[in-house]
Image (cartoon, grey):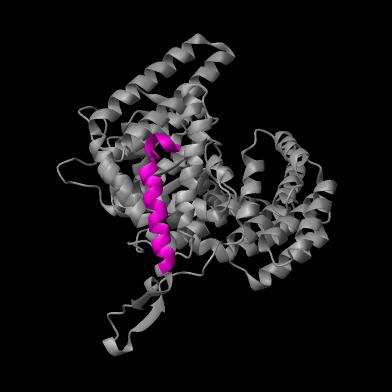
Amino acid sequence: MEIRLPGKPSILAAALTGALIFVSAAAAQDSKLPDIGSSAGNMLSPARQAEYGAMTLAQLRHAGYVLDDPLLGGWLDDVGQRLGGASDKPQQSFTFFMLGDRQINAFATLGGYIAMNAGLVLAADREDEVAGVLSHEIAHVTQQHVLRGAERAQRDSLPILLAMLGTIVAAQKSGGNSSSDATSAAVIGGLGLLQQRQIDYTRDNESEADRIGIRAMARGGYDPAGMADFFVKLQSVLRTNQGDERSRTPGYLQTHPITLTRISEARERAVSLNKAAPAATMRVASNPLLPASMQIATNGAHARGETGDFGWARERLRVLSANTPAQAILEYQQMQAKQPLNDAQRYGLAFAKQQAGQTTDALRDMAVVQAAHPDSLWLQISLAVAEAKAGRAADADRRFETMLVARPTHRALVLSYAQVLAERNTPAAGARAVAVLRPLIGTGADDLLFQRAYARANEIAGDDVRAGEAWAEAAYLGGRPEQALVQLNNLKKRETLDYYARSRIDARIAAITPTVLELRRQGIRDEDATRGKLGFELRAGKRNDIW
């Protein structure tokens, strides 16, 4: 069977792409899927795992599941990297990303890629609870449970995938809107089942992840009681949801069953860690280049406590994960009818109004919240954006420029300002946006939001070559590698390209081509390619230009 991706991203096709990539990353089958590992001990190299993790993220983006927001992404990465650095393998690379689904769920996949659903954050009361889930997923990576689980799933993955595809084909043939609904349900259900089988951890795995993860929480400066507290919350959700099978069991509970024993053990560990915290956090910094007499005793824990941004993050997420801004406003009105909104919720309501186009009211409400928390960079950025949306460009620029003096490489700040500038669509604004983005070039290669912002900034500034290169990177990171090759091959036709630009483009074509070949071997094609729009063919591992 072959899956074709249409010119416009298809939720169905892209979701299936993500599933197929995860299957291929899991293990080889006695089929036409590529052999990338075996249960005989030939595990994937860390580099190969990272490649498949990146492919999975890209295809989830293409499916429309990933919620890319600079403020939310920065918060999640801050929490995750803090925990990763405090884990038993701080050298492991981690990538954390948010999914817009409101179902309570989180999962880790190959290469240290860890996803968290919006619903999980919305269900939490404090950042320590979110940290408990993240540290648990981090432990699944560091203890190689993900890799082992992928190998155990070899016999299961293909039958599940075929069953899912058969359901989708049947739904597609039924026609009408109901077909679309049935297709979406089949995709979501199939992916959930596929994921469950592939991360079907044993009880020993779960216990080990709890034990290792809660230690990382304590070392990372979080309250280890947060893990047990969230377990209790999940158990409560399971008991109160007595509807159909889909609503009764959240996705996270399907792969991470909660028991009274597990809750009790988490509580006991939390009490023990909190009692031993001062002594346990003192460790010796090991530097092989220094003699023992010069080793420095350091505190193994990071700065104590939460980041301080959890409330803002949860409410921003509430708005962005709602079906519409109007629905988010209605949620806040219902909350307000029960009790007065707190500052974080008032921020969320202001943001929802901004998203709904009520810019004057949004700015007024945002300014009130920001005045009560003048030291919050999150609110400073949000207020500057609100000023720009309300037509107060000079005020927004002054606020952004003041913040940039102190934090020229702060990702959320830089991306937010660049977006504001790009919306003006003038060469001067584009040139300023390019300058603002320049400090992030060294770290933005795999950053979709950066590549989009850099592409747009260069586009309106008049640099079509840099814009084209960045748009190609954005297409690649967004799960459209064949479209990335379209952009790059189009750029190659320009006679005005200098040597350095042509070398960069050739290097990226060479790097992206293997990904396209991998997808094509799995029967996954971009629909534009089948209509001859790509301008090149990939045969037997070779690229033949036919411009």
The stretch of residues the image draws in magenta is 252-275
Image-quadrant location for residue 516: top left
Number of marks in picture? 0
Name the side, left or right, on which 369 lies relative to 461: right
Front residue of this view, candidates 118 and 93: 118
The x and y percentages for residue 435 are 64, 64
| Quarter of the rendering occupied by the N terminus | top left
The x and y percentages for residue 7 are 53, 29
Q: Residue at x 32, y 36 (%)?
A: 198
Look at the picture and state if 465 lies above or below 300.
Answer: above
**Residue 253: within the magenta?**
yes
Front residue of this view, candidates 464 and 522: 522
Q: Residue at x 73, y 58 (%)?
A: 429
| Quarter of the rendering occupied by the C terminus | top left
**Residue 294: within the magenta?**
no
Look at the picture and state if 327 lies above or below 501.
Answer: above
Residue at the left extreme, as displayed: 40
The x and y percentages for residue 528 are 48, 29
